[in-house]
Image (cartoon, helix red, strand yellow):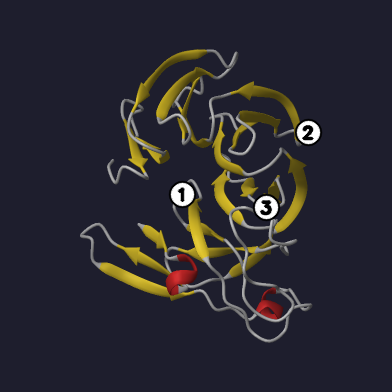
Amino acid sequence: FFAQNMMYNHTVTVYDRSYALAATIDDRVDLPSFGHAAFPGGHQGAPVEAAPTSDGAHMYVSNYEMYGPGLASGAGDSCDDGIWPDSFVYRIPTDTLQIDQVIRVGAVPKYLAVTPDDRYLLVANWCSFDVSVVALATQTSVARIEVGRHPRGIAVSPDGTTAYVAVMGGARISVIDLATFTETRRIATGSGPRHLVISPDGTILYLTENGTGRVVKLDAASGTVLASVATGTAPRSMAMSDDGTALYVVNYESGTM
């Protein structure tokens, strides 16, 4: 289990199945040694979210911002205080628990997801209002897809053809074709769509709405609301059980799950 401790601790902490601390990974990196020669001098990150490959061999960790020469710090969730530089994602192998790749993405990256075939990493860039598509075989960004203000949660269809992105500042879900890297349609939502998960068969989307305090069940094909339930104030992060029968939801301002 990986916990990202952002700019508060500048670490990622890793725990084993017995809940014992397995490693504390410092977020300091030498960017030129990872192929980013334009940024000498040593940098720190701010690890915020993580996504594993299908085999659990690697974890990708987004950095809310980077601190160091050539990269202005002080990013904020409003995105109104300046133009923030693009940030980076770290790759951490789960056998060594040491950063071995650093990949440039957009500004203030938050949620990220690996496609089921491990071909692409999708990164929601909160302050550049787009989604980075990274080809994992080459560690390079192959597309930046504009989706609107504050993209957050990402769910990928089981066949890897479609990505659904919760656009938290736009009250909608952006549907992206992963063959063409284009937005094909939009699904209207309640205020503050935040986190998305998809059913194992790919037919149902589940969405937390930070503004309405509800978890919503949607038909993935049509976007039709099938059901909803109030869970608390500001439901945000969510996870689904492996068998697809239960959701676990954090109600941020209620202090409950």
At 38% from the left and 74% from the top, the residue drawn is 24
Q: Amino acid at mark 1?
A: Asp
- The spot of residue 154 in percent (x, y) is 56, 39
Dot 1 alpha-carbon crowd within 10 angstroms: few under 14, some 14 to 19, many 20 or more: few
The circle drawn on residue 127 is 3
Q: Which residue is mark 2?
A: 180
Residue 254, x across and y down, in percent: 31, 42
Q: Choose the circle earlier in sequence order: 1 or 3.
A: 1
Please name the residue that numbered disc 1 is placed on.
55
- In the image, which is nearer the foreground, mark 2 or mark 1? 2
- Asked if residue 97 shows in the view, the reply is no
Q: Residue at x 72, y 84 (%)?
A: 40
Label 2 secondary element = loop
For mark 1, give the secondary structure: loop
Q: Amino acid at mark 2?
A: Thr
Q: Is residue 109 left or right of residue 145?
A: left
Say what amino acid the circle numbered 3 marks.
Answer: Cys
Q: Nearer the viewer, residue 251 or 59?
A: 251
- Circle 3 packing at 10 Å, graded few (<14), some (14-19), many (20+), is many
Per the model, the C-alpha gap separating discs 1 and 3 is 31 Å
- For the N terminus, the image quarter is bottom left
- Label 2: how many Cα within 10 Å (few below 14, some 14–19, many 20+): few
Quarter of the figure with residue 94: bottom left
- Residue placed most toward the observer, 236 or 25: 236
1 vs 3, front mark: 3
Q: Is residue 2 left or right of residue 60?
A: left
